[in-house]
Amino acid sequence: MDELVEAFIKDMKLTAGINRQRVIQAWNAVSGAERYTVDVYVKAKVMYCTIGSSMVRNQLYFQKDFILQGINEYLKNDELFTWDWDANGDCVKVLVLR
């Protein structure tokens, strides 16, 4: 059944949309800043997060390494996230807080 679901997702070209939702979910779960997050997107292994509160952004800035590690671990354990690269590498290398 798992193989059928993966094949369906690839055939219907849904991987980009599902991956985007999984990355947002990983950010919300690891950072705890869902309430203050305005936008999240990943481009070329760089995660850009727009935060609506300068105080929360400052607190997150000091936790960047912990958050990056947590997001990558979360995505590695996520069965719906589709790796388009070597699974041993990280999905997100840099976190940019705006």
Image (cartoon, rainbow, N blue to C red):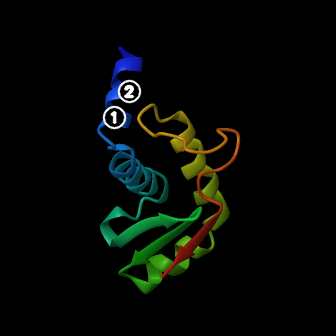
Whether the residues at callouts 1 and 2 have beta carbons within 8 Å, the answer is yes
- Front residue of 19/85: it is 85
Mark 2 burial class by Cα count in 10 Å: few <14, some 14-19, many 20+: few
Label drawn at residue 7: 2
Residue farthest right in this picture: 88
Residue furthest front in the image: 11
Q: Residue at x 38, y 54 (%)?
A: 20
Label 1 and label 2: CA atoms lie apart by 6 Å
- In the figure, is residue 74 to the left or right of 41? right
Please state which of residues 42 and 78 is positioned toward the viewer in this rendering: 42
Residue, x 48% and y 39% (percent of image)?
82
Residue in the foreground of this view, choosing between 44 and 66? 44
For the residue marked with disc 1, what is the amino acid? Asp
Residue at label 1? 11
Identified at 64% across, 58% down, the residue is 66
> Of residues 88 and 51, which is closer to you in this image?
88
